[in-house]
Image: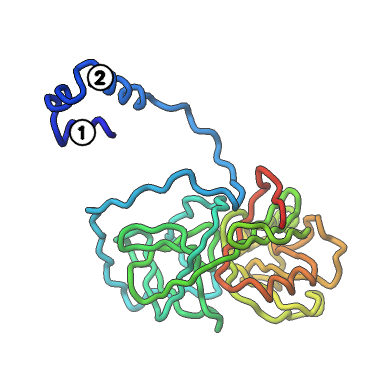
Amino acid sequence: MLFDRLTSRFGIAWLATAVGVPALLALALLVHSSLQPAAAPSTPRPVAPTDTPSSTPPPVPDETIPAAAPAPRNLPVVDYSPAPAGFPADPRPLSTTPLTEGVAPARNIAAYDAPGGRPLAFLAPTISGVELTMPVVERRTGWTAVLLPSANRRIAWLPQGGWTTVALRDQIVVERTPHRLTWYRHGRALHTWPVSLGMPGQSTPLGRTFILGRTEPPEAVYGGVDIFALGSVPDDPDAVPTGLKGAHIGLHSWHNDDTLGEDATNGCIRLTRVAQRKLLAEVPAGTALIVVDELPTPPATA
């Protein structure tokens, strides 16, 4: 507070002399009134990607950097299977604020449950042969939090070293209620397309995830267009058909567009072949993809 900083530096007597006793009392009253309890916050809602955060907490210059505990060599390596348990929840899973930086491991790096916390697994440079890039969601002195692959709404904390940063310019927002996908670049909506989403019991998982990589279509029903595998998995793995056990949620096209605008998939996001080819050509791995029920205002495309 301004009042606290002035009194701690110069003292009450100096302030009284400099500004006068009446002015000093008025300043103290103003500061006191600003400390009154605020009204209870309303339920958080997703914001449009073009919105910017209202404020960014300033860094604490003398913050102690928690040391990274040595990671045992026998920790599991995160792969295409579900990630190990114990990682913390994404603190802002429905935030549509663009994530503009990613982390690419240069070697196996230990992933922790908190800054200075427990190492729970290793993150490798590749998953199933695809180079791994994870969006950054938070930073603290000496530590970086990323979206965890092969998990829903979970993050991992990384100490410094063993990874490089990658600039991310794109973002994909999927709205479940209007069955709409919008592609953003630098916070500007470029294209909007209708999509099919998960049927009841196999709903497309809410929250932030990212494009893990691309793969060739295993069957003709995908319309002959490559598939984007996402970092998320079905919320209820036991609800999906036997042939899809262990699979990730995908972003892909279909051999026809008959079910666009409907809940008809096993949790995947299905769009037209033209739209999928456009995204494959323009959007790299590591790009954040956020699933919300609906944005407060419909996106206006350029």
SS class of the residue under badge 2?
helix
The one nearer the camera, 100 or 242, is 100
The one nearer the camera, 260 or 274, is 274
Q: In which quarter of the image is residue 66?
A: bottom left
Q: Quadrant of the N terminus?
A: top left
Question: Which is more N-terminal, label 1 or label 2?
Answer: 1
Disc 2 target residue: 23
The one nearer the camera, 293 or 183, is 183
Q: Where is residue 42 in the image (x, y as percent from the top left)?
A: 54, 33
Q: What residue type is labelled 1?
A: Leu
- Left/right placement of residue 301 relative to residue 131 reads right
Disc 1 target residue: 6
The residues bearing labels 2 and 1 have C-alpha atoms spaced at a distance of 14 Å
Q: In which quarter of the image is the C terminus?
A: bottom right
- Left/right placement of residue 162 relative to residue 10 reads right
SS class of the residue under badge 1?
helix
Q: Is residue 10 above or below residue 170?
A: above
Q: In this view, does 296 lie above or below 236?
A: above
Q: Position of residue 11 (x, y in %)?
A: 13, 30
Q: Quadrant of residue 242?
A: bottom right
Check disc 2: other Cα within 10 Å, few if <14, some if 14-19, many if 20+.
few
Q: What residue type is labelled 2?
A: Ala
Q: Position of residue 142 (x, y in %)?
A: 31, 63
Check disc 1: other Cα within 10 Å, few if <14, some if 14-19, many if 20+.
few
Q: Quadrant of residue 120?
A: bottom left
